[in-house]
Amino acid sequence: MPTYTAPTKDMAFVLHDVLDVENEKIPGYEELTPDFTSAVLEEAGKITGEVIAPLNVVGDKEGCKLENGVVRTPTGFKAAFDQFREGGWTGIASDADYGGQGMPYILGMTVSEMVSSANQAFGMYSGLTNGAYAAIHAHGTDEQKQTYLPKMVSCEWTGTMNLTESHCGTDLGLMRTKADPQDDGSYKITGQKIFISSGEHDMSDNIIHLVLAKIAGGPEGIKGVSLFIVPKFMVNEDGSLGDRNGVAVGSIEEKMGIHGNSTCVMNYDGATGYLLGTEHRGMRAMFTMMNHARLGVAMQGLSQAEAAYQNAVIYAKDRLQGRAVTGAENPDGPADPLIVHPDVRRSLMDQKSFVEGARAFVYWGAMMIDKAEETGDKDADGLISLLTPVLKGFLTDKGYDMTVQAQQIYGGHGYIEEWGMSQFTRDARIAMIYEGANGVQALDLVGRKLAQDGGKHVMAFFDMVKTFISENKEDEAIADFITPLKQASKDLQTAGMFFMQEGMKNPNAALSGSSDFMHLFGHVCMGLMWARMAKAATSALDAGTDDPDFYKNKLVTGRYYMQRQLPATGMHLARIQSGAENVMGLDAEAF
């Protein structure tokens, strides 16, 4: 059975050596000292490795079962969820006014990564709750916050987000779910939502659904969508639970992966709902939830790649197969371990350089969210808005690829369920689809985010990279990081200029290259992260360290990325510059 060990040393390296969190001028970051974060990471590592990870295979094999309108989660999930809640882990980054621990979002992200690597399906129950919490916290009335947030912080009550309907996913303006105003200020919600993660289960006393619906007489399309709080059980004035609301699970989906999470069809039959935020401004409130969720999904691309990689390394060191081409390295055995073979090393280096770079990229994104939310920094808010589709799309595309590579290390055994490697691939696949399919992320990046605020934020990114290169151009120790980063950044800027020159004349020319641009941008971000990590590693070695091998290995891994992965920016640029004719050349009837 696969195992998982939290990579706490690498997490600490990113937090302290690379991001220097304790010296950032962000409220709460002064508490993020190495001793404090070490204690948190070690304890989180224990519960995820010892309690949650062993249930990953259980959840995959058993799945969830619908019995008399109630979804039963896999064996052991409820007890583990109770233990996770009682440890305060569900509210680590939540507002202390509502029972949370008030820690920065970035620290919550480190814990979320561990939970997701250990058991992605399990982590979704609290993860969706955190998203619903964020939306209510940002847009709810004081009464709504007092009513729902304390129980959601503790996960005594969990939360969901209800967007998709059978006839509309990305195009939410087509939704049919109705909200009829009532004399007491509430609404009656009627309609059906599908693909609702954690929509019904047996691990919490109540489920707080956030539901998008249209108020009769409102504007057409997306401008007429409002967001509503619809509890599974009504909440009395004293906070106790009352009658069952008019919401029920219709069925649970049979899915490719994340079997341990209940993905439900939810039926709303005149259910009582309460407006969250402003009428007809539901997407604004929902995007508060979705922006956090998209960074969380980016993290899932990292987390599944990390878990798969760990097990691939164990197998590659243990499995005996053939002899090293340079001579036997295990002369007393019948064969050498797989890891001696260059192509196996190449695959493992692909995986290792991805997960370590992706971790830095995700944590940097989390720090930008903290900076924007805690200090009101508009530049940080604009930059994370620009990078969110890159984080989500690039890291989940590549994270899935890495799980496939890890599975491949096992050869035929990787295809056999007994070994557990296929689960990482199957679970990782959904991250490319939900919270906005990756093709839509690429369109959002090229169609909206590049031009946002007059292109201010993408120019700020280019300036950031240029400044880093300029400040470190004389540092011979990291010259082999600076030179390829400079070329990759030029490729990105050239692609951006192509869109500006061709996009107005032929929008298809830009949109045909949108996925390539998202990946090009992602590689540049990873190159920047690796350059920053290289600088941190060389500084640590120069200062003296009790673990020089860690930092030397970091440099070797980073050089691999810069030499083997970052040059992909040239390929993506060539594809972009080829325009739309090769993409749009066939008539629809020719397919």
Image: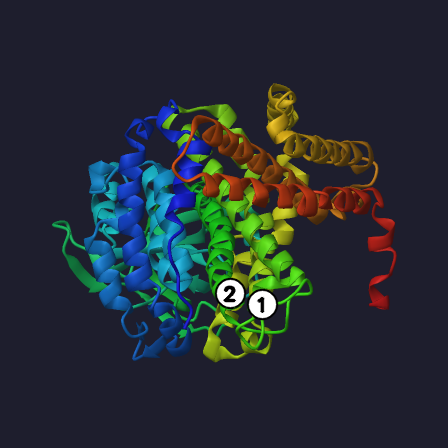
Three-letter residue code for mark 1: Leu
Q: Nearer the viewer, residue 368 or 157?
A: 368
Q: CA distance from mark 1 to mark 2?
A: 6 Å
Local packing at callout 2 (Cα closer than 10 Å; few below 14, some 14-19, many 20+) is few
Q: From this view, report whether residue 349 is shown above or below residue 24.
A: below
Is residue 80 among the parts visible in the rendering?
A: yes
Q: Residue at x 25, y 67 (%)?
A: 78
Residue on which disc 2 sits: 317
Q: Is residue 220 left or right of residue 504?
A: left
- Which numbered circle lies on residue 338? 1
Q: Nearer the viewer, residue 466 or 586?
A: 466
**Location of the C terminus (image quadrant):** bottom right
Three-letter residue code for mark 2: Lys
Q: Is residue 313 left or right of residue 123?
A: right
Residue 543 position, x and y percent, is 44, 26
Describe the element under mark 1 as helix, strand or loop: helix
Q: Earlier in the sequence, mark 1 or mark 2?
A: 2
